[in-house]
Image: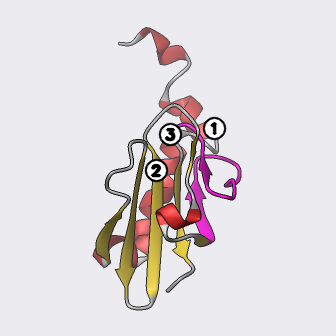
């Protein structure tokens, strides 16, 4: 058992609304509620970006945008670099998203793209 079990454990994660456990529970719920996340056509965005991973899932008239910072540093994305932006944010690790799109360390943002 890891020495940090006193500070990092399921009991504490259940009490923290912005914990990784809560994030995954919310993501699972989103997948159940939105077929686009499961059955939508996948399109990779910015394949050569060194710090961010971004993609869309499109089904019928709905397009979901997912943007992930893979680093421990802030990453700023230009709108034209991403080519898309959010009309509605469904899920993020932080209290609110920063616009223009600034991803905080290891942040994930999931939401609707407004260009469909």
The residue pinned by badge 3 equals 106
Residue 6 drawn above or below residue 56: above
Question: Which comes sooner in the sequence, label 1 or label 2?
Answer: 1
Q: Which residues are magenta?
A: 87-105
Q: Position of residue 36 (x, y in %)?
A: 38, 77
On residue 15, the disc is 1
Residue 52 drawn above or below residue 39: above
User: Is residue 9 left or right of 54 when viewed as pictured?
Assistant: right
User: Is residue 24 left or right of 44 when viewed as pictured?
Assistant: right
Question: Which comes sooner in the sequence, label 1 or label 3?
Answer: 1
How crowded pointer 3 is (Cα within 10 Å; few <14, some 14-19, many 20+) is rated as some
Q: CA distance from mark 1 to mark 2?
A: 25 Å
Q: Residue at the spot x=62%, y=56% of the render? A: 101
Quarter assignment of residue 77: bottom right
Instruction: Indicate the secondary structure of the residue bearing disc 2.
Output: strand
Instruction: Indicate the secondary structure of the residue bearing disc 1.
Output: helix
> Label 3 near label 2: C-beta < 8 Å?
no
């Amino acid at each position: 058992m890891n020495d940090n079990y006193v500070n990092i454990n399921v009991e504490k994660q259940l009490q923290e609304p912005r914990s990784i456990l809560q994030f995954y529970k919310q993501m699972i719920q989103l997948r159940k509620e939105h077929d686009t996340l499961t059955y939508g056509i996948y399109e990779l965005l910015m394949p050569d970006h060194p710090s961010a991973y971004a993609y869309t899932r499109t089904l019928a008239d709905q397009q979901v945008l997912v943007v992930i910072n893979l680093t421990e540093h802030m990453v700023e994305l230009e709108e034209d670099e991403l080519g898309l932006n959010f009309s509605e944010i469904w899920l993020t690790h932080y209290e609110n998203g920063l616009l223009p799109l600034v991803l905080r360390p290891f942040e994930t943002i999931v939401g609707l793209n407004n260009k469909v």
